[in-house]
Image (cartoon, rainbow, N blue to C red):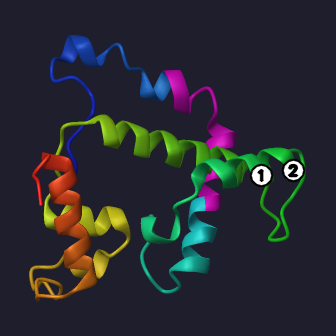
Amino acid sequence: MRASTLPESSEDRKRFPVASGVLDYFPDALVAVAEVSQRANDQHNPGQPLHWNRAKSTDEADTMIRHFLQRGSLDVDGLRHTAKMAWRALALLQKEIEAESQVVLTHDEWCVREGYPGHALPYDPCMTKGCTIEMGYQTYLKQATGASE
C-alpha cells in the first residue's frame, strides 16, 4: 500500500475533504474519467488487471491539450474528449506531486507504478543483471535519493 499524502493528525486531515469537496461535486465527471481508465487499460494492457502503465503514458501535457481542443465532442472510441483531457490533467498533477515528494518507492511499488505489475511479486523476475526494468528502478533510486553515479 502506498504512503498517504494526507497529514497524519486527524485535525489536519479534516482540511482535505476528498469525498465532500471533490467526489460529491463531480460524481458524473469522475465516472467518465474512470471509464477512460478502464477502456485505456483494456486497449493498452489487454487481459491485465486495471493499472496505470506509465511506460505507455508519457506525454500528458500535449495529449491533454489535444483533447482540450476537441472538448465537447466524442473521440472515435465513443469516449468524451473532455473526460480524456481530465484523465491526462490528473496524471500530470499526480506526477508533479510525486516528483516533489520525499517518498522513495520500494522496488515493488515502483514496478506497479510504472506499469510492470508482474514484476512486483514474491518471486521477483527482474532482479537479474541487465534487466531493463531493474535498470529503470536503479535509475529512479539514484534520482529519488540524490545518489551520484
Residue at x 79% of width, y 54% of height: 80
Q: Position of residue 144 (x, y in %)?
A: 19, 49
Can residue 149 be found in the magenta stretch?
no
Relative to 94, does residue 39 appear above or below in the rendering? below
Q: Is residue 62 left or right of residue 123?
A: right
Could you tell me if residue 51 is visible in this image?
Answer: no
* In the image: residue 101, left or right of residue 74: left
Identify which residue is drawn at 61% across, 79% down.
43
Q: Residues within 10 Å of mark 1 (few under 14, many from 20)?
A: many
Alpha carbons under labels 1 and 2: distance apart: 5 Å
Determine if residue 117 is in view: yes
- Label 2 residue SS: loop
Residue under label 1 = 67
Q: Position of residue 115 (x, y in %)?
A: 38, 71
Residue highlighted by disc 2: 70
| Residue type for callout 2 | Gln
